Image (cartoon, grey):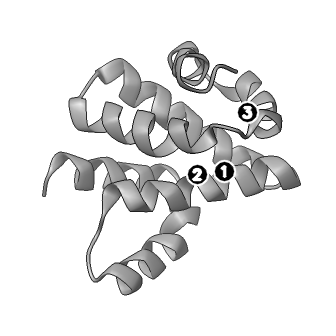
């Protein structure tokens, strides 16, 4: 298992609510494509932020990203930056709702990449 797959495996342990999206992703792609799946994760987080639902799940996901940013593993950093944070570009309303839930590392990435 490569680093990206391990990152996703750990994410699914933190947020088992993503397993349905994960299983659908596997059916659609015949394999795990971590960067593509992170797009699904971003959509889940955006929908939860917009609807006010699943706040506890979103907090667990954001906390996990914060831990991974601090660990500094290259593949994890790339997945978070390129496939989560960059997908939030242009989502200023959502970003403003999520920012209070973010740790300093994730907030710094959001500000650097999204300018928010």
Q: Secondary structure at mark 2?
A: helix
Q: Secondary structure at mark 3?
A: helix
The Cα–Cα distance between marks 1 and 3, rounded to whole angstroms, is 10 Å
Residue 1: x %, y % from top left = 13, 58
Relative to the observer, which residue lies in front, 71 or 113? 113
Relative to the observer, which residue lies in front, 101 or 81? 81
The Cα–Cα distance between marks 2 and 1, rounded to whole angstroms, is 5 Å
Compared across the picture, whether 71 is left or right of 43 comes to left
Q: Residue tagged by mark 3?
A: 95
Of circles 1 and 3, which is in front?
Answer: 3
The C terminus lies in which quarter of the figure?
top right
Residue 45's tag is 1
Query: Are circles 2 and 1 on residues that touch, CB within 8 Å?
Result: yes
Residue 49: x %, y % from top left = 78, 47
Mark 1 surroundings: few (<14), some (14-19) or many (≥20) residues within 10 A: many
Q: Is residue 88 above or below residue 43?
A: above
Q: Residue tagged by mark 2?
A: 42
């Amino acid at each position: 298992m490569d680093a990206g797959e391990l990152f996703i495996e750990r994410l699914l342990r933190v947020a088992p609510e993503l397993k349905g999206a994960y299983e659908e992703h596997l059916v659609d792609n015949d394999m795990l494509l971590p960067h593509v799946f992170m797009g699904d994760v971003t959509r889940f987080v955006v929908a939860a932020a917009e609807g006010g639902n699943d706040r506890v799940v979103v907090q667990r996901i954001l906390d996990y990203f914060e831990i991974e940013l601090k660990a500094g593993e290259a593949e994890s950093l790339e997945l978070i930056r390129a496939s989560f944070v960059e997908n939030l570009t242009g989502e200023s309303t959502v970003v403003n709702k999520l920012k209070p839930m973010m740790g300093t590392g994730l907030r710094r990435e959001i500000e650097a990449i999204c300018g928010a």
